[in-house]
Image (cartoon, rainbow, N blue to C red):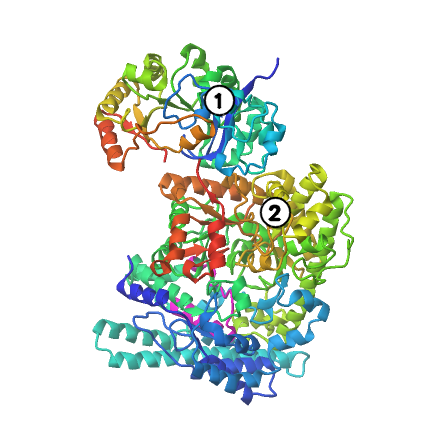
Amino acid sequence: MMACKGRILQLQHYSVNDGEGIRTIVFFAGCPLHCRWCANPEGYTPENQILFIASRCVQCGRCTAVCPQHIGWDLNDAAARHACIGCGACVDVCLEKARTHTVAEYTVKEIVEKLASQQLFFRNSGGGVTYSGGECTSQSQFLSELVDAVYDMGLDQAIETSGFFDLSLLRPVLDKIDLLFIDIKLMDREKHKQYTGVDNSLILRNIAEIGTHRTGVVIRVPTIIGINGDDENIRKTARFVKTHLQDPKMELLPYHSYGADKYMQLGMTYDESSFGTPSEEDMARLNAIIESEGVTVVSYR
Amino acid sequence: MLTERIQKAKDEYVNNKPAISYDRARIWTESYKRTEGQSEMIRRAQAFKDVCEELTVTIFPGELIVGAVGEFRKCGILTPEFSWTWVDKEMDHFSDRVQDPYEMTDEQRQYVRQHIFPYWQGKSLEEAFLAQIPDETATVAVDTGIVDIDSKWRQSVGEITPDYEDCLLKKGFGGIIAECKDKMAQLTLSRPGALKQQDFYRAVILCSEGMITLARRYAQKATEMAAAETDSSRKNELLQIADICSRIPECPPETFQEALQMIWFYQLGGILMENPLSLNPGRFDQYMYPYYQHDKAAGLHDDNGILELIECYWLKLSEWVWTISANTADFFAGYNQFQNLTVGGSGRDGKDATNELSYLALKATAEVKTHQPGLSVRISQKSPRDFVDAVMELVAQGTGFPAIHSDKTGYQMLKNLGYETEDARDWNNCGCVVPHFRKTFEWTSTVNVNFSGAFEYATNGGKSRITGKQMGLPVYQDRQFASYDAVEEAFFTQFDNLIDISVTGTLVAQRLQKEMIPRPYFSALFEDCLEKGKDLVDGGAKYNVGPVLTGIGLAEAANSLAAVKKLVFDDQVCTMAQLLKAMDENWEGYEELQKQAQQAPKYGNDLDYVDDIAQRIANHFYEKTHSYTDIYGSPFTSAFMGISNFIPTGRVIGATACGRKAGEPISEGVSPVAGTDISTPISAMKSCAKLNQDIHSGGTLLNMRLNHDLVSTKRGRSNIASMVQSFFDMGAFHVQFNTLSTKTLLDAQAHPEQYKDLLVRVAGYSTQFVHLSKTLQDSIIRRSVHDGM
């Protein structure tokens, strides 16, 4: 059998905010949702793209000389983006680190080797591996093989997911996961569709179903003032969580605009004018609402 | 919360510039004029006793622990018998020099030039060394930044951990005198060596009597001050001080304050004797614990009372300054005296011995923020969780303290030197990161060897790229290398030559120190010295460990070799001739090649390509160093320490193949080159731990900057603690963190007046940021900041 390969954005070692202890996060490429505020827009698609940091470019011409599509140095020109096939020839010759690949292919074995190099740190800290993305469940076959292999290493495993997946397919995988982070971006179905591109009913159905069978679930809300950071949405979310989870827990992640540069580097436009970062007071108020609904507020900061 | 007393003393400490006192030098010189013809042993002891009898006795406001090296509260002293020419040359600019300035008046300068220096003309250790060092050794080993032995012929050796536990606290100087008299009575003077033994015992008695006299003068002074004191509580304090100083250090102490006064008096005596670096308080939480328990049981003090006393002692350790040349100050920046104090870790039986005092020591440093003592902790998987948490809380304060050490690796380093098991478990830190044991005579920081120098000479026919001077061996003068192996071979050839020069210089310094600077005062606290009637410099200690050579620029040299391998031989992006030309031209006109060089694999990112080279260099360094023996027959020891030496050692090296430009800093200890460990702190630690750290018994050092966010929550601190434990599980010895944000550091640079007490870790030690030169500040800011992801 040919070893299945995963399309991975990044293996990020020494991560400390997505689960217990010191962790490595495996970012899977490709996502069925296209949240407008997404901090990792390179993960929308499983295809490799070239990130281009124009401010670093000195227009030396080394990239132009090797480009099979004869694209000029400015990759973020609309026509250039259209012509780019993501071969990465330009990345290899750039001396300014102005270009990087978004996606690399890995076998399970390759990832396991990289995880093994961090093992001591996982064990001393109670940490492990977190699968994220993009959307890790969008490569369910590869995820399943990887989870089996890491399970055999005896490492703690967590998943960070949009909840938008076919549960019947994922159930054996989830059984081996110690901690599930599932997002509820918005309770309002229409707004959810408007901002993420998909309906939230599958997500909510999956959460309800998972909640009846297991603990170790944390519902996360990327909290954006002007989109979902209002008292009503948070209260509704908390009520839903309280109703459907045996051990109801939530974590609000305040919106940040750190992803804005990436849109630029991918030649995409990003309109953050309608996205507000919650203040400390906002966070305190919203967390109080969650607690008042009988849901525990957790933090991995 | 600081008490008012401590707050006032601290304010003076952070606001005053140290001043020079010539009092000690004056008395010493007058004494020497009277003792011409006597043995060196007796002359030094007599001069010391004279100092104890005549030195100005000063008790500063609010002090509970008394005893000052001179008339100023922040004070440095002169020791012309070691060296005076540099003082003569530099003292007119003492107050305006860049690194570690001192106050000195015209009147003082005139006095020392007229009455002190002329006597020492031709008699100092410095002059003897310069007269006797072979010319070819001097070319590379005197004030070059390539092989630096400066601190062993311009200064005293220092580097002692007094045996308080088994000697001073048990016997007092009274007991030591009685023991010496007893021993002397048993001598048959006609036997070989007995006369020398008699000299030694007489000298120890003179030193001991001196200390008792000095303490009694403090008792007298306190009594006088009490009589004049109107504040009744201060009056009582002064009367208590008078009472303590009338008995201590002659008799063994009973209370915590008495014990503290005793160890400070001993420290004070050591300073007056030698103006030493690294006179280490050692395992403070162990030998002071019985007195802590006594006071608690007797209801004399609660923990706050004990803490205030500890803070008084911390201030005493910080108020005197080491008087050093501008050159030495470049290597040891920040008024640092390297008085290392170690808490936590295993006891002699191997059980964890962390106790209440271990915590109070951390608390004292957190509160009073003095740069001394150099606070070190020993950590293992056996350490109480609370203690590890307390350590991480101090780390989170950003002071750079404490230096965190592996209990186990320290033990292993001493075992590898042949220590008995229980002694090896009982190690403390010496200076910055040297595992040490109190019954040991060792030069723990002898030579700084510039590894980048070996690379420069290997690739430039033995010549300096900056001056063109022939500094290395005249080999590969055609600069032709058929393979990477040939480059490495050239590197090790030049490397071995530098080690050889280091050893030669050390042997000259060792012989002179032995002849000229017997050490009866320090020998007094060595049971073996007293038993044998043999001074430390004659090999009287239980353990004689060979001098430590410190490698500087390990990461830089490995990176440069890796760049040659990658660019010239593996990827063939340029020829060796082109790369050498680019280095000759300091990369000017070769900017593209420089970038490629900068992108070659760098040590500190867990890349075997370059880490293997670093490991080869480190192993070779150990083998080569270990193959030499010193004048006592002990093999030399290797280390990768820090200090601030990566800056002056970089200043004398031209462009290097890793993309570094001429004059830029190299690297310290086993740390990566600043700014090149761009992966994760785990990768940096993994690179460092690949070195066989335990063979480098002189210590290894890793400095790391962490984003403050990583330690701002308890959970974050637990993760850092786990990271440190993992690092130690891999066999590493030391790590120290700076957790201040770049913003804070830049702000401190712009507004030094608002950051007078801001402590930062330099390298294996911490000091006030505002006391560092701009270059050193900049290079601290440049260290890679590791973020959580």
The x, y position of residue B189, in whole percent, is 64, 83
The x, y position of residue B530, in whole percent, is 56, 72
Residue B295 in magenta?
no
The x, y position of residue A67, in whole percent, is 60, 26
Q: Which mark is residue A29?
A: 1
Q: Residue at x 35, y 33 (%)?
A: A256
Tell which subunit mark 2 falls on: B
Residue B271 in magenta?
yes
Q: Is residue B584 left or right of residue B752?
A: right
Q: Secondary structure at mark 2?
A: loop
Tell which subunit mark 1 falls on: A
Which secondary structure type mostly characterizes the magenta part of the structure?
Answer: helix
Mark 1 and mark 2: span between their CA atoms?
35 Å
Task: Using a 10 Å C-alpha cutoff, classify the residue at mark 1 as few (fewer than 14 neighbours), some (14 to 19) or many (20 or more).
Answer: many
Q: Secondary structure at mark 1?
A: loop
The x, y position of residue B183, in whole percent, is 56, 77
Q: Which residue is more in the foreground, A81 or A125? A: A81
Cβ–Cβ below 8 Å for labels 1 and 2? Answer: no
Q: Which residue is more in the foreground, B631 or A95? A: A95
Q: Residue at x 68, y 41 (%)?
A: B567
Q: Which mark is residue B643?
A: none
Query: Both on one chain, marks 1 and 2?
Result: no
Q: Residue at x 42, y 16 (%)?
A: A32
Q: In the image, what residue type sits under mark 1?
A: Ala
Q: Which mark is residue B659?
A: 2
Q: Nearer the viewer, mark 1 or mark 2?
A: 2
Q: Which contiguous range is marked in magenta?
A: B260-285
Q: Which residue is more in the foreground, B205 or A271? A: A271
